[in-house]
Image (cartoon, grey):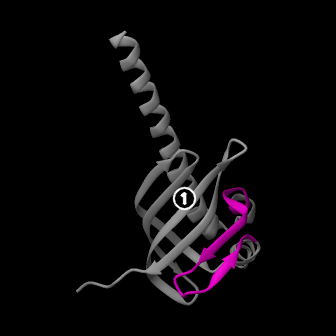
Amino acid sequence: MKTVLLTMIIAVGAVQATVEDTLAGMERAWCAALVKKDAAALESILADDFTGVGSGGTTSTKAAQLSDVKAGGVRSCVHDNIKVRLYGDTAVLTGHTVLTGTGFNNRQVLWTDTFVKRNGRWQCVASHSTLAAGPK
């Protein structure tokens, strides 16, 4: 009985790690889509009812995000410190990103993204970013 329970705990832990890896990978794919101007990749990541709040305080929809990625402007996008917290079919991801592109150089943002699993598929439903504070 103890062996069965231990096996179940290990299996659940492995599934959770896989989900966390999948979600972190989706964040990295989002970053890559910005650089590659790959709207199709971003379309699969964002839910149809997506709402975003950018570091400049503006709100956006999925359609606006897709339009922005097609227009380009991001030359480099590097994520670090991605953390994933799972709550059933909802996940909250936080992280830090450094962006370089047209009109900005080494813009550092902190972000929180909320993903929901619908119909067996994870998608981002909400995103919020803010400029990271400079060194004190």
Please say whether residue 85 is visible from this viewpoint: yes
Rendered residue at 46%/67% (across/down)? 78
Front residue of 34 and 85: 85
In this picture, is 76 found above or below 22?
below
Q: Give yes or no for residue 83 being in the magenta stretch.
A: no
Front residue of 69 and 94: 94
Front residue of 4 and 23: 4
Relative placement, left or right, of 92 versus 32 is left
Rendered residue at 44%/63% (across/down)? 94
Tell me the amino acid under the disc marked 1: Glu
Where does the image place residue 6, in percent across and percent down from the top left?
36, 19
Rendered residue at 50%/52% (across/down)? 24
In this picture, is 86 found above or below 17?
below
Please say whether residue 37 is visible from this viewpoint: no
Relative placement, left or right, of 107 versus 68 is left
Mark 1 closeness class: few <14, some 14–19, many ≥20 residues within 10 Å = many
| Range covered by the magenta-colored residues | 42-62
Where does the image place residue 5, in percent across and percent down from the top left?
39, 18
Residue for badge 1: 27
In this picture, is 117 found above or below 15?
below
Relative placement, left or right, of 133 versus 39 is left
Where does the image place residue 68, in percent across and percent down from the top left?
70, 78
Identify the residue at the far left of this view: 136
State the image quarter where residue 52 is shown.
bottom right
Disc 1 secondary structure class:
helix
In this picture, is 119 found above or below 52?
above
Identify the residue at the far bottom of this view: 103
Q: Give yes or no for residue 47 being in the magenta stretch.
A: yes
